[in-house]
Amino acid sequence: MEINPSIFKAYDIRGTVPDQLTSEAAYRIGRAFAQYIWVTALNKEQNPLVVINADARSSSPELKQELLRGLMDEKCHVIDCGLSTTPLHYFAINHLKADGGVMVTASHNPAKYNGFKLSRRGAEPIGEGSGMEEIRNTALRGIFPVPSEKGSVTEQNMETAYLDYICSLVDVNAIQNMRIVFDVGNGMVGMLLPKLLERLPMLEAEILYGEVDMTFPNHEANPLKDETLKDLQKAVTEKEGDLGAAFDGDGDRVRFMTSSGFAIPGDIMTAIFASYLLKQNPGEKVLCTVNSSRVVAEIILQNDGEPVMSRVGHALIKKGMRKYNALFGGEFSGHFYHRDFFYAESAFLAMLKLFVILSESGKSLDELIQPFLRYVSSGEVNVAVADKDKTLDAIALHYRDAKEISYIDGISVVYDDFWFNVRPSNTEPLLRITMEAKEKEALEKQLTEILNLVKNT
């Protein structure tokens, strides 16, 4: 049986179930991943140790079972850590010193989707240019020997160990009394948040949509989309909360909201975290993506840090985090990467760090962010195009007199009063435009100009 090659993405494996992602594909991916891990394992004399977790989508049990069967047929020792968030999965790989891991999840995508996030030892992601092509080709070929022996599987719950670890990374006792409203969006954070709050008695908490139900009956669990934040905004303002926090489906992203109901973009939060962390660790490197606000690099430099620009995408950012031994990294989407969390993202850890920042500053979140809102932004504007490369060439030609042009991820163009990045989507025929300017009028004028250029190319 053939499997659909479109499920193999730049950062993970993902598709609709069962038309794109099938149980047969899950089995083959298990075998292909295991063969890759056999090659990359530190100790090739022992059968590889692989950690698996899953989210609570209705398709997850069957996909996990077929994945497990594939791993077992390649003689892997598997530790099944059950239902979890993706950050807990990353912790489990490291805590158990596994050779790799697979998280069965489609992150923030709607219920009909599912997929796999693949990692090597240390929770180092497998993606484009770092193993995905090899696994893809092996799975598509589908030629596997009949197993002469099978691996083993044991079960282990890592929830308490995970919460112990992230709470050890901040001074929890420094957190002062606050009223917090959480929107879990019926995602996997609902399993862990009440247990975390038991450790934080100083917080008065209200949880929206905390029951895990990954049919997502209330709204899509994607806090990058402003329309998913309406209920949180209403609750924060009506309950006079000090802040709000909204999570995505698999719990690796978080978006924060002020008491006035302002949903803070992830790049502005990156600047806030960088400012605080660099005061304690001057001279360190902080990663930010090409579509981030200019304020991020400015704040990093003002606090004696070194900004490092990265392409967008968790696998690429984690690669850069390791390469530069970066202290911290963040992106517009609400992924926040921590060196003290294996260079990976943990929404809970970012949240705990913010609680400490607010407690020590004595300011409200609205007051805290004001110095960081220096520019006006378009947010991310997606435009469908027939030929992404042709359109990018047209943009480069049109703006050839710019003060600065770079090609780290798509094209970034800088003028004195405005700047923008245009990058191609990895999965759709879209260009993603992010523009920023000193004044609103300049933003509106220049955004209209580039949209007309893109649409007419």
Image (spheres, rainbow, N blue to C red):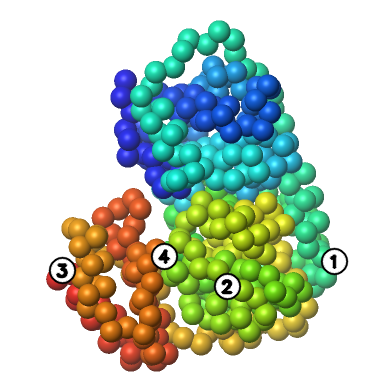
Residue hosting label 4? 408
Q: Element under label 3?
A: loop
Q: Nearer the viewer, residue 398 or 66?
A: 398
Q: Nearer the viewer, residue 350 or 74?
A: 74
Q: How many marks?
A: 4
Q: Quadrant of residue 246?
A: bottom right
Residue at the top extreme of this rendering: 148
Three-letter amino acid code at the position of disc 1: Asn
Specify few, some or many for label 2: CA neighbours under 10 Å numbering under 14, 14-19, or 20 or more.
many
Specify few, some or many for label 3: CA neighbours under 10 Å numbering under 14, 14-19, or 20 or more.
some
Residue 353: % across, % down: 71, 67
Residue 52 is at least partly visible in this image: no
**Residue at point 81%, 64% (across, down):** 172
Q: Earlier in the sequence, mark 4 or mark 3?
A: 4
Residue 119: % across, % down: 57, 40
Residue hosting label 1? 173
Residue hosting label 2? 307
Q: Decide: marks 4, 3 in contact (CB < 8 A)? A: no
Q: Quadrant of residue 271?
A: bottom right
Q: Quadrant of the N terminus?
A: top left
Residue 371 is at least partly visible in this image: yes
Residue hosting label 3? 457
Q: CA distance from mark 2 to mark 4?
A: 14 Å
Three-letter amino acid code at the position of disc 2: Pro
